[in-house]
Image (spheres, coloured by chain):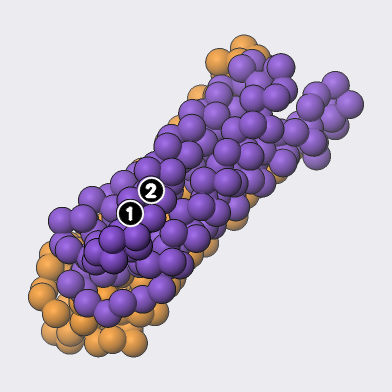
Chain colours: A orange, B purple
Amino acid sequence: MKDLPGMPGTPGGLGLRLVQFVFAAVALAVMASTNDFPSVTSFCFLVAAAILQCLWSFSLAIVDIYALLVKRCLRNRRAVCLFAIGDGITAALTFSAACASSGITVLIDNDLDLCSENHCASFESATAMAFLSWFALSPSFLLNFWSMASG
Amino acid sequence: MKDLPGMPGTPGGLGLRLVQFVFAAVALAVMASTNDFPSVTSFCFLVAAAILQCLWSFSLAIVDIYALLVKRCLRNRRAVCLFAIGDGITAALTFSAACASSGITVLIDNDLDLCSENHCASFESATAMAFLSWFALSPSFLLNFWSMASG
């Protein structure tokens, strides 16, 4: 197994986890700051997915910090398998929630022109943050899946 | 490289491609049969993604049939890399279109109760077919990515 930057237990991997955590937390905060998000199912789903993403990225960031501090290698087969499955599930959830929310925001903004009555800016920025969190998650997933397959 | 069922050039792989093609074609036909889908951006995106999915799966099915007929092995590195990248792009597009459309259908059906004025049943079945097409595509993508990593 080669030691690629971005894998768990490397500084790059820790950076990716922190970026994921920050973007998911911002998406959660922005969406939860609007008072009418519970009226749309997709926005509730986005909040749920962002919470799960925050918890997952934060736990993995702590594992990475521990591995960096005690200089342990996290690249054993069982850990990589667990990380790849967890990353796959959270990536699918975050991406689907972001896509569903973007469908709604595009409907509100472009098709129906209802932006003056809604918190369009908040909805759109929360969706964008969820997409950015997914962009930071996908290299983690691909690297873990790659090292699971090649190991 | 091990010969897993479902990889390109095997009967399982051909079956997966045909299932993807049929579900994407049904999604396209059902969505295009409604007269008001162009008023929602997400539904237009679903139509575009279903067309791309149809073309991709159909071409790969023809390649699989050719490989089965002349008994050629498709598992060389460059072909598998090409298949994995194409599968990844079409899978991401189909999944995002299906998620965006499902966000809209859930909004229309559950949150706003506008189903009597819309073609809800058509929208929902087209979305479900797009999801089924993605379910058939994801094993193809994972197997190709796996054999790209392990080869």
Q: Residue furthest front?
A: B70
Q: Amino acid at mark 2?
A: Ile
Label 2 marks a residue whose chain is B
Q: Quadrant of the N terminus of chain A?
A: bottom left
Q: Whole-percent x and y of residue A136?
A: 31, 52
Whether labels 1 and 2 share one chain: yes
* Residue A93 position (above or below residue B148): above
Residue depicted at 55% across the width and 24% down the height: B44
A127 on left or right of A9: right
Q: Whole-percent x and y of residue B39?
A: 64, 16
Residue holding disc 1: B66
Neighbours of disc 1 within 10 Å: few (<14), some (14-19), many (20+): few
* Residue A140 position (above or below residue A35): below
Label 1 marks a residue whose chain is B
The reply to whether residue B92 is visible in this rendering is no
* Residue A74 position (above or below residue B140): below
A60 on left or right of B42: left
Q: Amino acid at mark 1?
A: Tyr
* Residue A128 position (above or below residue B149): above
A105 on left or right of B5: right
Q: Nearer the viewer, residue B139 or B73?
A: B73
Q: Residue furthest right?
A: B116
Element at label 2: helix
The reply to whether dot 1 and dot 2 touch (C-beta < 8 Å) is yes
Neighbours of disc 2 within 10 Å: few (<14), some (14-19), many (20+): some
Residue holding disc 2: B62
Q: Nearer the viewer, residue B146 or A85?
A: B146
Element at label 1: helix
Residue depicted at 13% across the width and 65% down the height: A5
